[in-house]
Image (tube, rainbow, N blue to C red):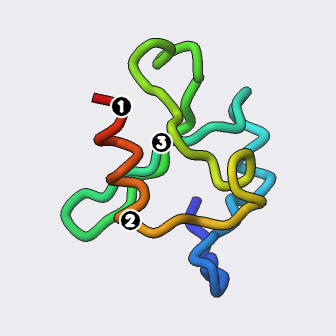
Amino acid sequence: MEKVVKATSKGQITLPAKWRKNFDTDHYLVKQNKGELLIKPLEIDEVSGEWEVIFNAERDNDGKGIPAKELAHILKKMN
């Protein structure tokens, strides 16, 4: 099934509920590949230990993003 979705001014898109209901997750892996975006349902248990969330705008900053330089600074402190 194909569906045209429109990005919001913040760049967000909505996955139709009809699609989301097919998967028992609310996490998705989004990957850019040769001019296309791949959106894949992700079971968080599949990647436990492989991924670490270092910044979550909703959790850490009242839903606001941070500048790339600030993120780079956080990453450098992790090493």
Mark 2 Cα shell of 10 Å, populated few (<14), some (14-19), many (≥20) = few
Gap between marks 3 and 2, in whole Å?
Answer: 21 Å
Circle 2/circle 1 CB separation < 8 Å: no
According to the picture, the residue beneath numbered tag 2 turns out to be: 68
**Is 66 on the left or on the right of 57, as rendered?**
left
Q: In this view, does 4 lie above or below 25?
A: below
According to the picture, the residue beneath numbered tag 1 turns out to be: 78
Residue sitting at the far left: 34
Residue 43 in the image: x percent, y percent?
A: 58, 23
Residue 29 in the image: x percent, y percent?
A: 48, 42
Q: Specify the quadrant of the image occupied by residue 13.
A: bottom right
Element type where label 1 sits in the image: helix
**Is 16 on the left or on the right of 79, as rendered?**
right
Mark 3 Cα shell of 10 Å, populated few (<14), some (14-19), many (≥20) = few
**Is 79 on the left or on the right of 22, as rendered?**
left
Q: Residue 42 carries which label?
A: none
Label 3 vs label 2, nearer the camera: 2
Q: Which amino acid does label 1 sit on?
A: Met
Residue at 56 percent across and 36 percent down: it is 41
Q: In this view, does 6 lie above or below 58?
A: below
Q: In what quadrant of the picture does the N terminus appear?
A: bottom right
Element type where label 2 sits in the image: helix
According to the picture, the residue beneath numbered tag 3 turns out to be: 29
Gap between marks 2 and 1, in whole Å?
Answer: 15 Å
Residue at 63 percent across and 76 percent down: it is 5
Q: Specify the quadrant of the image occupied by residue 7.
A: bottom right
Residue sitting at the far bottom: 9
